[in-house]
Image (spheres, rainbow, N blue to C red):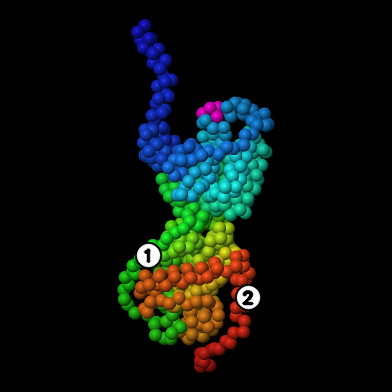
């Protein structure tokens, strides 16, 4: 009897005990271990053992992203429940009642206004705890209303996604939300509203295939799984085992679909930097402070044949600053943006947003790398088609936000390879030239090293084109020219002189607008002076362009290039007939 009484007491208190235990401990879905709730909360709802990021409630997200945990919830439209009277193992109405009771929210969408880094912003959240964040009529109406609110208030709009896709219980009515939300996104873009998408775990189906992949900037939270069809469905269809990293945030970054993968703890700071540039916040630049890397001091082989070929060797000097060196030395609040949204991320073509001194700008350029490893990683500054398509995307981003474009080109040419041809290298270069000529925003292009063929002019069609003093610009390398026309590579210096490829030659031919001085020994001898001279020259050109009448940039740029090369007096240097 005593045993039964004790047992009865335990059973009576079991429900209360389980409830308290659930409040104190959380079981990680990834590693299976129990995590103490206070540790879990203080770690931004990330498992401290394995790093798995748990789904956050809308309140937790708002507190994470808004300044001082202060925000105001926006009232969203209410729609009728269960328009199709859907029943599976349970009536859809009953599922909605349970979800509302468990989460405290009416449906999967919650929106709030607040401040991020001093900038008023609207955040809309798909709640993964409400029927897996699925998108039905209520969610669609909520997203549309939230975007319209951002347009009315002229505030940046951040969409936080966590969803299994369209809601099956509403069938075609949920499918139509893909089109409806896309209409709202188009309105955001047409009104120049910054649209940032934060993709969290999981984001799938109709959500990914509509508004979630149409942002100006895509941020994937580290650890997120993102895709259209689920992994299991794909494996069943193709009868193959997929890679372990398939549909991870990192996988999407490698394949050009997201701009960055960011740990949850760094999200707020990253978004603040992006918003400062896109909303053109006032910025006071710091003093440029860079150190010139030590060189071996050896004389460069081949110097002294003639001035033209000396410039070729100076332009290729291994110690010369490259794109990322200029970014690190000149640009502040820099955010690297990755991917062409079609195939991949190309590290040979770098780009992003930041403040060039006091000017918020989009900055693109080829990066050659400096060590053996970085040169191979950046493919010696020779982009693939996806690199040029990324440049196009960033040019259009600049046009939307009326940000100046600054390009720093330095490449021997576009990458020549079978895969590049298969993916449309010529088409990509042609479209990049066309985009650069048509975007209606100030555009300053600077040759900071080698200007090699179509690979260079793809990002060289600026309103103003500048060249550093010891740089070159040519349709082909002098070595290749000598091999083809002189039938001997030893005439490379003669070819360089004949090709008229120096900055002074370009100025005389009216191909460029300004030569930027370099230190007496060349840019590679004094990075500090080089960056000061370059940064000032670019700032002056942009300020001059911004004084011009708005709306005429693309037309004036077109006329400039149409007039180029007309009435040129071309004179070949003398050489022996035997050298032909």
Q: Which residues are magenta?
A: 98-102
Depth check, mark 1 against mark 2: the one in front is 1
Verify whether residue 99 appears in magenta. Answer: yes
Q: Look at the image and tell me whether residue 15 can be seen.
A: yes
**Whether residue 234 is visible:** no
Q: How far from the left and from the top, in percent, is residue 459?
A: 54, 68
Relative depth, front residue between 519 and 165: 519
Residue 207 percent location from the top left of the image: 58, 43
Which image quadrant is residue 296 in?
bottom left
Q: Secondary structure at mark 1?
A: loop
Label ID, residue 497: none
Image x and y of residue 63, in percent: 45, 40
Tell whether 245 sits left or right of 524: right
**Disc 1 or 2, which lies upstream in sequence?**
1
Q: Are marks 1 and 2 in contact (CB under 8 Å)?
A: no
Residue at (56, 71) in percent of width and height:
463
Q: Which residue is mark 1?
A: 287
Q: Give me the disc on residue 562.
A: 2
The residue depicted at 38 percent of the width and 40 percent of the height is: 43
Q: Residue at x 47, y 68 (%)?
A: 539
**Residue 40, image x and y in percent?**
39, 36
């Amino acid at each position: 009897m005593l045993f039964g009484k004790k047992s009865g007491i335990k059973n009576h208190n079991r429900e209360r005990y389980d409830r308290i235990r659930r409040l104190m401990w959380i079981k990680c879905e990834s590693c299976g271990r129990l995590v103490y709730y206070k540790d879990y909360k203080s770690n931004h709802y990330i498992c401290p053992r394995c790093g798995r990021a748990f789904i956050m409630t809308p309140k937790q997200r708002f507190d994470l992203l808004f300044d001082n945990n202060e925000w105001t919830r926006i009232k969203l439209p209410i729609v009728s429940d269960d328009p199709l009277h859907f029943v599976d193992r349970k009536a859809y109405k009953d599922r909605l009642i349970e979800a509302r009771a468990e989460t405290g929210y009416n449906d999967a969408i919650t929106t709030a206004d607040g401040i991020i880094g001093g900038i008023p912003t609207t955040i809309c959240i798909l709640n993964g705890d409400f029927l897996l964040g699925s998108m039905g009529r209520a969610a669609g109406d909520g997203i549309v209303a939230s975007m319209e609110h951002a347009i009315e208030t002229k505030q940046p709009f951040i969409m936080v996604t966590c969803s299994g896709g369209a809601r099956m219980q509403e069938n075609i009515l949920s499918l139509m939300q893909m089109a409806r939300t896309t209409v709202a996104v188009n309105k955001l873009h047409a009104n120049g509203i910054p649209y940032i998408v934060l993709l969290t775990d999981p984001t799938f189906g109709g959500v990914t295939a509509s508004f979630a992949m149409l942002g100006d900037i895509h941020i994937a939270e580290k650890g997120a799984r993102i895709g259209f069809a689920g992994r299991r469905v794909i494996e069943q269809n193709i009868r193959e085992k997929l890679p372990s990293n398939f549909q991870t945030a990192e996988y999407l970054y490698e394949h050009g679909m997201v701009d960055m993968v960011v740990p949850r703890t760094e999200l707020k700071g990253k978004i603040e930097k992006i918003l400062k540039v896109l909303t053109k916040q006032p910025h006071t630049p710091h003093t440029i402070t860079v150190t010139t890397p030590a060189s071996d001091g050896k004389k460069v082989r081949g110097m002294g044949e003639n001035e033209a070929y000396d410039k070729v060797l100076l332009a290729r000097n291994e110690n010369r600053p490259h794109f990322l060196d200029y970014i690190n030395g000149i640009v502040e609040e820099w955010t690297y943006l990755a991917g062409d949204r079609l195939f991949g991320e190309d590290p040979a073509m770098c780009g992003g947003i930041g403040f060039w001194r006091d000017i918020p700008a989009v900055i693109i350029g080829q990066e050659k790398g400096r060590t053996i490893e970085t040169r191979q990683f950046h493919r010696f500054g020779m982009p693939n088609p996806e690199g040029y398509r990324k440049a196009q995307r960033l040019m259009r981003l600049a046009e939307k936000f009326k940000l100046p474009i600054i390009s720093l080109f330095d490449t021997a040419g576009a990458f020549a390879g079978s895969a590049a041809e298969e993916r449309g290298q010529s088409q990509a270069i042609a479209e990049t030239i066309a985009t650069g000529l048509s975007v209606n925003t100030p555009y300053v292009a600077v040759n900071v090293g080698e200007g090699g063929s179509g690979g260079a002019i793809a990002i060289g069609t600026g309103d103003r084109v500048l060249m550093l003093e010891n740089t070159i610009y040519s349709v082909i390398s002098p070595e290749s020219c000598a091999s083809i026309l002189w039938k001997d590579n030893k005439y490379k210096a003669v070819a360089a002189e004949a090709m008229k490829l120096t900055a002074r030659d370009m100025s005389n031919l009216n191909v460029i607008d300004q030569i930027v001085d370099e230190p007496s020994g060349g840019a590679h001898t004094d990075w500090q002076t080089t960056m000061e001279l370059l940064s000032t020259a670019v700032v002056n050109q942009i300020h001059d362009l911004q004084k011009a009448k708005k709306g005429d940039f693309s037309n004036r740029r077109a006329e400039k290039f149409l007039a180029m090369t007309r009435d040129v007096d071309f004179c070949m240097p003398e050489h022996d007939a035997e050298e032909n």
